[in-house]
Amino acid sequence: KLSKRLETVVSFIKPNMKIADIGSDHAYLPCYAVKKGIVPYAIAGEVVEGPYQSALKQVEAANLTDRISVRKGNGLEVLQSTDQVDCIVIAGMGGALITEILGAEKQKLASVSRLILQPNIAAEKVRKWLYEQNWQLVDERLIEEEGKYYEILVAEPGNPTLPYTNLSKEFLLGPYLLKKRNIHFKEKWQAELRIWEKVLQELNKAEKNEETEAKKAALIQKIKMVKEELI
Ligand code: SAM
């Protein structure tokens, strides 16, 4: 059985898309998507030897070696233009790493009609990157699993400005998530606020210099923005 987090990611794969799951670890996601008949074929990319071996074993154990190609390499390096991948999934990493992977080989995105991204932290960075690189955010989900909150972002080539009315606020909170405000929205941001307020207290205790002052100002601004949306 797949985690709720990965199941939600899978729910955004359109039937028959050719997918690549980058940073696949055990290749749970591609195995599930192929077994369920959602996609006929998948590529699992993994850069670290241990997880790469786990992916190979998992795919063999599931008898899917003819339908899932497990490849070792850094980010999009594992993709060839002949692969003609329609959909790239990157889940379970930080937002900065996700944008680094996508940005390192942009030409590999030429055939791609959908990105499904699940940043564990810094979704803000991912939204901003998509916007700047002309990807239109087309949907978002906020889910809770075992006390953790996860954001799933879906993007397609298109008009990147469409979902936004207030960039700084919506990069942070998510334009669709902000509109929907599901049951987890308030909880998630209240938890973030508690962390930020602690960080702010620490910064207030720290030696005053340009760097801490800039950090404080940025944090105060974020706290204000989020608080405005929670009342
Ligand atoms: N995608 C799976 C999920 O969401 O459950 C696994 C997430 S796991 C926390 C992150 C995986 O990404 C690790 O197995 C790590 O080795 C891999 N990874 C990190 N940087 C990578 C890169 N540049 N290219 C490919 N894989 C990478």
Image (cartoon, rainbow, N blue to C red):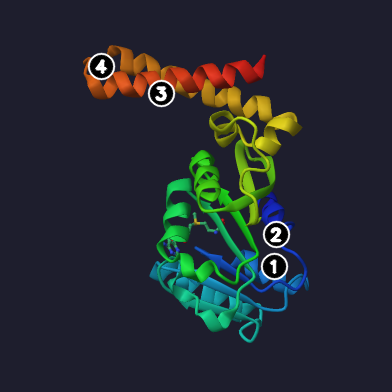
- Amino acid carrying label 2: it is Val
Please tell me which residue is depicted at 40% across the width and 67% down the height of the picture. Answer: 48
Say what secondary structure mark 4 lies in.
loop
How far apart are labels 3 and 1 at the CA level?
Answer: 41 Å
- Residue that badge 4 annotates: 206
Label 1 with label 2: CB-CB less than 8 Å: yes
Q: Nearer the viewer, mark 3 or mark 1?
A: 3
**Which residue is labeled 1 in the image?**
32
Q: Is residue 175 above or below residue 214?
A: below
Which mark sits nearer the N-terminus, 4 or 3?
4
| Residue 202 coordinates in the image, percent (x, y) | 33, 17
Residue 10: give its label: 2
How far apart marks 3 and 2 lie (CA) works out to 35 Å
N-terminal label among 2 and 4: 2
Front residue of 48/117: it is 117
Kind of element beneath mark 2: helix
Tell which tag, 4 or 3, sits nearer the viewer: 3
> Of marks 1 and 4, which one's residue comes earlier in the chain?
1
